Amino acid sequence: MSFRVAVAQMNSETGAVAKNRDKAVRLIEGAAALGAQVVLVPETFTTGYDIANQLDALAEPIPGPTTAVLGDVAKSRHVYVYASMVEKAAGKYHNTGVLLDPAGKLVHAYRKVHLFAAEKAMFTPGDKAAIVKTEFGTVGLTICMDLLFPEYIRGLVLSGAEYILNSTDWLRWGPLDEWQWCPEQPRALARIRALENTVGLAMACQWGEDGAYTKFGHSCIVSPSGRVLAGIEAGEGFVVHELSMAKVGDWRKTATYLADRRDHEDLYRRLLST
């Protein structure tokens, strides 16, 4: 199966929920007008990232106002929408990815498993993976730092995911430092995770400034061979491209990574048990 996917890139204004939602809706509508069947929106798109002191005021229930807005645009434009937002549930806060279908229904809510540094003081991590069947294939839902854990993405693929969707906000605090953390690394992660698992991958990123943070951009759509099919580096906007697994069987005859791992499973178990 194949489908046309769009990755929308935006600069969410810290705390400006209504304004950010409106911007996301315009990007989704624009991508749908160009034939997108699935549209990804960046991580914490309604609130921005640097919201520790506003968390209770900005977090929402799921379902709630934001999923209602996303459901309306998904239904009116007949597209799937995947985006990350800040959820409040049972007195806890989560970084949660929501998937809406073309009927406007909330299909799945995925709570981010792998939390980055400062996030651990804000959010409670999820403990369940998200693998969702759709008419165009099976997708694994991920958020940002999930891509840094190859065993997690490999597990999603071995459990049936054909495509990885990633809503993200790769960022850096302050100026470029000795670690040289910059946009090339997140883009490389997307390419490597697609290549080593021979699956399609789409990653929608934040861009611009968020308080003391610089958001990297570099949203992309990546083939099962790790090739960037389309992307947007800087600025706000979106790109649309077909993502397909139609000929992946031929590619896997050369790129035998998934099959070859079976020869070493006992070794991997020993290494990963520490």
Image (cartoon, grey):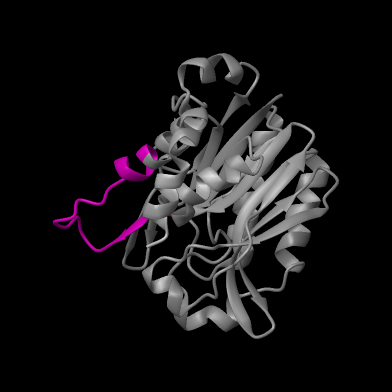
Above/below status of 69 relative to 193:
below
Q: Taken as a whole, is the magenta stretch helix, strand or loop? A: loop
Give yes or no for residue 222 being in the magenta stretch.
no
Identity of the residue drawn at 54% across and 70% down: 125
Of the 4 image quadrants, the one containing the N terminus is top right
Q: Which residue in the rendered view is the most extreme toward the left?
A: 178
Q: Quadrant of residue 87?
A: bottom right
Image location (x, y in percent) of residue 104 = 82, 50
On screen, residue 46 versus residue 13, left or right, reads right
Image location (x, y in percent) of residue 265 = 47, 42
- Note whether residue 24 is visible: yes
- Note whether residue 147 is visible: no
Q: Quadrant of residue 128?
A: bottom right
Above/below status of 264 relative to 127:
above
Q: Which residue in the rendered view is the most extreme toward the right?
A: 103
On screen, residue 160 versus residue 16, left or right, reads right
Residue in the foreground of this view, choosing between 186 and 15? 186
Image location (x, y in percent) of residue 177 = 16, 58
Give yes or no for residue 172 being in the magenta stretch.
yes
Q: Which residue in the rendered view is the most extreme toward the bottom?
A: 91
Identity of the residue drawn at 60% across and 26% down: 243
Residue in the foreground of this view, choosing between 141 and 38? 141
Q: Tell me which segment is drawn in magenta.
A: 169-188
On screen, residue 208 versus residue 151, left or right, reads left
Q: Quadrant of residue 140?
A: top right
Of the 4 image quadrants, the one containing the C terminus is bottom left
Identity of the residue drawn at 77% across and 67% down: 63
